[in-house]
Amino acid sequence: MPREMMYGEAMAAAIAEEMERDASVIFYGQNMAMTERDPMLKKFGSRRVRIAPISETAEIGIAVGAAITGLRPIVELWMSEFMLVAMDQIVNEAPRLRYMSGGQVQVPLVLKAGFGFSAGWAGQHSNCWYHTMMGIPGLRVAVPSTPADAKGLMAAAIRDNNPVVYLHHYMLTLDTGEVPDGDYVVPFGVADIKRTGRDVTIVATGWMVKKALGAAEQLANEDISAEVIDPRTLAPLDVDTIVKSVEKTGRLVLVDQAPRQSSAAVVIAGEVAEKGFGYLRAPVVMVTALDASVPYSEPLENYLLPNEEKIVQAVRSLVAERVHA
Amino acid sequence: MRTRNARTKKRNTTKEKVAGHRLGNDRLIWMYTQMARIREFEEHVKRTFLEHPGAMRGHTHLADGAEASIVGALATRNPADFVMPTYRCHGQPIVLGTPPRKMFAELYGRKDGVCKGFGGSMHLADPERYFPGTSGIVGQSIAHAAGAALTAQVKETGQIVYCFFGDGASKQGAFFETLNMAALWKLPVVFILENNSYQAYTHVRLEDANAQAGDPLSKKAAAFSIPGVTVKGTDPLAVYAAVQKAAERARVGRGPTLIESRFYRLSAHGNAITVPPVPTQFPEHEAIGVYGNKAEYKEAKEKDPLLLFRAHLLKTAVLTENQLKRIENSARAEMDDAVAFALASPLPEPEEATQYVYA
């Protein structure tokens, strides 16, 4: 029986279930498991659930060393920006060690971090870093947009034998949705068609999936049928599902919370340009954040970020173009 | 230098007492043999640039001068303990038993290399022998070593970790963060700071506040409330004694120790960085090449750990001149063979390049 769960709750459930099924999974991070009352600490003990100092380089580097010697660490990093102080470990250690050793070791670890916190966190705590991670061979990047995906992708991340950057969107934390019970795993590299449509394909990740679905609802009132695709993992990226959708709709709108040139949208646009150019009946449109740091004040922040209205406008312009032609 | 048995005229059969442990002659001979093998390996690497130009690509870093420190430390090791060196990683696997043939094949980018030609000189790995790999980025592998220690602690395997890194690495954030966490979590790891006087090309006095103040670098341990010891890294028995104590501490769950092992790197930091097709080779040591300090280098050469330990073994009648020569000749022949094997090993197939990206 599926169960109604919050997005944040679903991630936590996956961690607890995976720790139950595999004793080599450990979980640590800053400001967690601070007292004996902590349920995870109670359940799994202080060997496997730990509190760490504010030392991302050591936290992640220790996870790398633990992973190559037989553990499956999950590091709670809270905010994706905190990964930036440990970039060497994430992009130049974890994904390299297996390759450089000629396949002798594997690095099964999960870096769990929230991103895109659009609630007045200003310039340094609100950004999107998946573009930086998705281009690193050896790294996997998961970006769930629903409670079910949050659970299934976390289970897959923990079972994967590679380093996984698991990025959950802060603005989705309290969203509820049905989550299948029991052993539920969402395989990496399989995009999900969140809404089917025939006139335009909208590809979005994280919170932007919700915005895209809202836009699709509005567009339906105007008799425009939008298909909404969530890649769910950016590495590996399911290009086939996107290209197949474009073959059907002939139009592509890419929605991304990151500034244009550090977005996943630019990568997807490139893939579609190469593999699906012949299917396009109009130019690809990218609805991204504007090129600025994220501002503090609400109207400034709203102006900068993609929203339903901007997506609706983009789709309208595309469809109009076709009518015009 | 210990002279406890110096009066013995004939071949000495008593045991050398080090840190409460009696090291039998077989152990002392094993130590010298490993030191000689490391030295010969590195001499062969150095000569490769002249004898087989183009066989090696990129950058290589030698352990000549570090032999006593490496071997003295690893002589305390139990068979399943982890060893985590840096990109200067030729010495440790030789002691662990990695075949030099496979190591040279790796240095030459060949199919038979220990990493099949994917890693090269800076990234040797032999996980079967408890050497899971290295990082080429200074200081970062200190955290990996603590991670291996975390595995041992969580799984209660009884293993400890020997973590080697240079004086330069002890100025990286990874060093400070990791030592704090390792102390906090009482991880079973021995941190061996190899102070070879130079951080790449820069003298340690110019880049380390402790060194500038005339203090030992082991003073850094006080910041983490763990023991910090400075030891003469040119004497394998002194290193053995210090590391043995630290290893015992780690084994009983009391956490890490920082050992500063002082010796002198006898070659330059690495081969000269040149852009192809300009050939590369080992330049003069920085003491002379950068600082014009011939006296410093001359003094270091006189304290060559191989010469010192050789003299000690002769003096204490553990080995005769002929026996020493036999060990040295055998090490030379072993490395001659390793080079010949590597030169004959095929290059990898180009399309293998996309293997091993993901597990």
Image: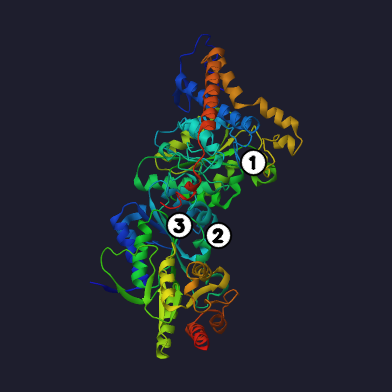
Of residues A165 and B189, the one nearer the viewer is A165
For numbered disc 2, what is the local secondary structure?
helix
**Disc 1 marks which residue?**
B215
For numbered disc 1, what is the local secondary structure?
loop
Which chain letter goes with mark 3? A
Q: Looking at the picture, how far across and down is residue B108, in whole percent?
A: 55, 37
Q: Amino acid at mark 3?
A: Ala
Q: Is residue A71 above or below residue B33?
A: below
**Disc 3 marks which residue?**
A52
Q: CA distance from mark 1 to mark 2?
A: 30 Å
Residues marked 1 and 2, same chain? no
Q: Is residue A163 above or below residue A147?
A: above
Q: Is residue B186 visible?
A: no
**Disc 2 marks which residue?**
A85
Q: CA distance from mark 2 to mark 3?
A: 15 Å
In the orientation shown, which residue stands out farthest toward the top? B10
